[in-house]
Amino acid sequence: MDDSFIRKLPKAELHLHLEGSFEPELMFAVARRNKVDIPFKSVKEVRAAYRFSNLQDFLDIYYRSANVLRTEEDFFDLTLAYLKRVAADGVVHAEVFFDPQTHTARGIPFNVVTDGILKALAAGETQFGITSKLILCFLRHLDEADAFVAFKQAEPYFDRLTGVGLDSSEVGHPPSNFARVFAAARAEGLKLVAHAGEEGPPEYVWEALDVLHVDRIDHGNRALEDPKLVQRLAAEQIALTVCPLSNLKLCVVKDMKAHPLRRMLELGLRATVNSDDPAFFGGYVYDNFSAVHEALELTVSETLALARNSILGSFLSGREKARHLDALNAFAAN
Ligand code: HPA
Ligand code: ZN
């Protein structure tokens, strides 16, 4: 299998934080036009600072870099740059996260953030043919009352939002803390996802399923520690949005050769490959496929299964999924 097979393979990305796609080059340009100081002199210096020993290490830098984003144009440019970049990676559909509380806490109005993103998602479909869905993530290091404020601010956008998620510092902030706001989102017909089992224990994955009633689990690595949980995830074909390079950079795995992705497929789990925060973790979705392909020596059929899972695990309609799966089968046959 050559590299162009992986690059051209039609795929969906289901775990991408827009703020995590903020490349240093764009960060400098936006900082300059907004007259915001950043504590780095060069792109090289920024990249050198991206060494993390755990999730919190990364989050500290990630929230600091988001502070540069101020205007609707900034959020537009951020989002369109991501779509332009992954158009070259065979991404046909993207379901992207944003963290409005990170911005509203700094005095940036909710609509400035959301309008910029939504306009870019529309432009990305026109310019690159990539369809997309937007998922609002609640920050779990803040309390549920704060999540409810964001949820209320989102109300005028419910028809343009696909779902809600849960991200930020996992350990010590179990999904059950957000039971009521997730129930309210569910009552509005929004889809539900949550980061669980990245650093947190299998119990957090159980809570995401049984208390929040999520449709997908983001990461889910530590679910493998609990055979009953694996059975449940496999039986219900709950998609896991796995992020190999993120796992490596945040020391969730010691070595890519030790990554559990193949084991997940062997256990019958609907695992997918995603980039999480590509500007910080050293690669976009192609680089993630490529890294696991090389380290785990994945076969063509395993690689195709990962792309198929990305379509099946998406929030596209049954008809749209069928259309993408047909295209994937046609690609595989060539
Ligand atoms: N985990 C939790 N929160 C996040 C992440 C992540 O990998 N990326 C951005 N916010
Ligand atoms: Zn994430």
Image: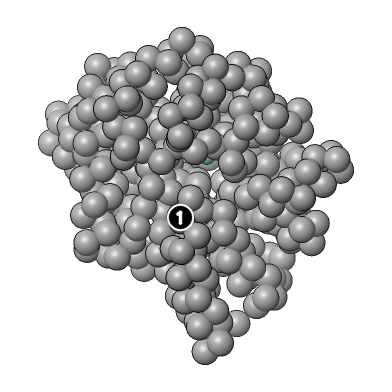
Query: Is residue 45 positioned above or below 319 on the image?
Result: above
- Residue at the location (41% across, 41% down)? 162
Q: In front here: 302 or 85?
A: 302
| Residue in view at x 47 percent, y 76 percent | 327
Q: Quadrant of residue 127?
A: bottom left
Q: Nearer the viewer, residue 114 or 74?
A: 114
Relative to residue 224, is residue 165 drawn left or right?
Answer: left
How is the model colour-coded? one colour
Q: Quadrant of the N terminus?
A: bottom right
Indicate the position of residue 195 as horizontal and vertical percent values: 59, 35
Q: Residue at x 74, y 39 (%)?
A: 222
Q: Is residue 199 visible?
A: no
Which residue corresponds to mark 1? 316
Q: From what the image shows, is residue 87 above or below residue 328?
A: above
Image spot of residue 56 (x, y percent): 56, 27
Q: Is residue 32 left or right of residue 156?
A: left
Q: Is residue 79 above or below residue 172?
A: below
Q: Is residue 122 visible?
A: yes
Q: Residue at x 48, y 22 (%)?
A: 184
Q: Secondary structure at mark 1?
A: loop
Q: Amino acid at mark 1?
A: Leu
Residue 159 locus on image (x, y percent): 32, 37
Q: Badge 1: few (under 14), some or many (20 or more) residues near its Cα, within 10 Å?
A: some
